[in-house]
Amino acid sequence: MKDRELERIGADQVALKPVKNADISVGAGVIFLAGVTFASVLGGVGLTLAKARRKSPDAFGKREEEATRLALKALGWGTLYAVSGVGLLVYGVKSALGVKNVG
């Protein structure tokens, strides 16, 4: 309730209205979400590579093998599709709902 104030509409109705001077700016929120997204992607890729390396350590010793290159390429494209797909989904929902301001 820190960033909202109560406003009396009628005798028994109360509405929330945004406070003009919010503590956190939109830029700080964007930076925070970008950092969380980057950490999630990095962690996911790292865990996937560690699991694959534990299952077949020889495949990572010989980087020239086609299967390893294909798997890393697929992992990279999959990560790109997942991140951009979620971004487009969020943007689409935001647009469909007509949200102008996140904060």
Image (spheres, rainbow, N blue to C red):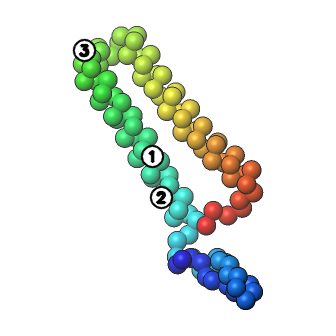
Res. 61 visible in picture: no
Which of marks 1 and 2 precedes in the sequence?
2
Per the image, the residue denoted by label 2 is 32
> Which amino acid type corresponds to the residue marked 3 in the rendered image?
Asp
Per the image, the residue denoted by label 1 is 38
Q: Is residue 99 left or right of residue 29?
A: right
Query: Callout 2 environment at 10 Å: few (<14), some (14 to 19), or many (20+)?
Result: few
Q: Where is residue 96 in the image (x, y as percent from the top left)?
A: 74, 50
**Number of marks drawn:** 3
Q: How far apart are marks 1 and 3 (CA)?
A: 29 Å
Q: Position of residue 47 (x, y in %)?
A: 33, 34
Q: Do the residues labelled 2 and 1 touch (CB within 8 Å)?
A: no
Q: Distance between the residues labelled 2 and 3?
A: 39 Å
Q: Farthest residue in the top direction?
A: 66
Q: Where is residue 79 in the image (x, y as percent from the top left)?
A: 49, 33
Q: Are marks 1 and 3 in contact (CB under 8 Å)?
A: no
Per the image, the residue denoted by label 3 is 58
Query: Callout 1 environment at 10 Å: few (<14), some (14 to 19), or many (20+)?
Result: few
Q: Image height check: is 10 above or below 100?
A: below
Q: Nearer the viewer, residue 1 or 75?
A: 1
Quarter of the image for residue 57 reads top left
Q: Which residue is drawn at 32% across and 23% down?
A: 52
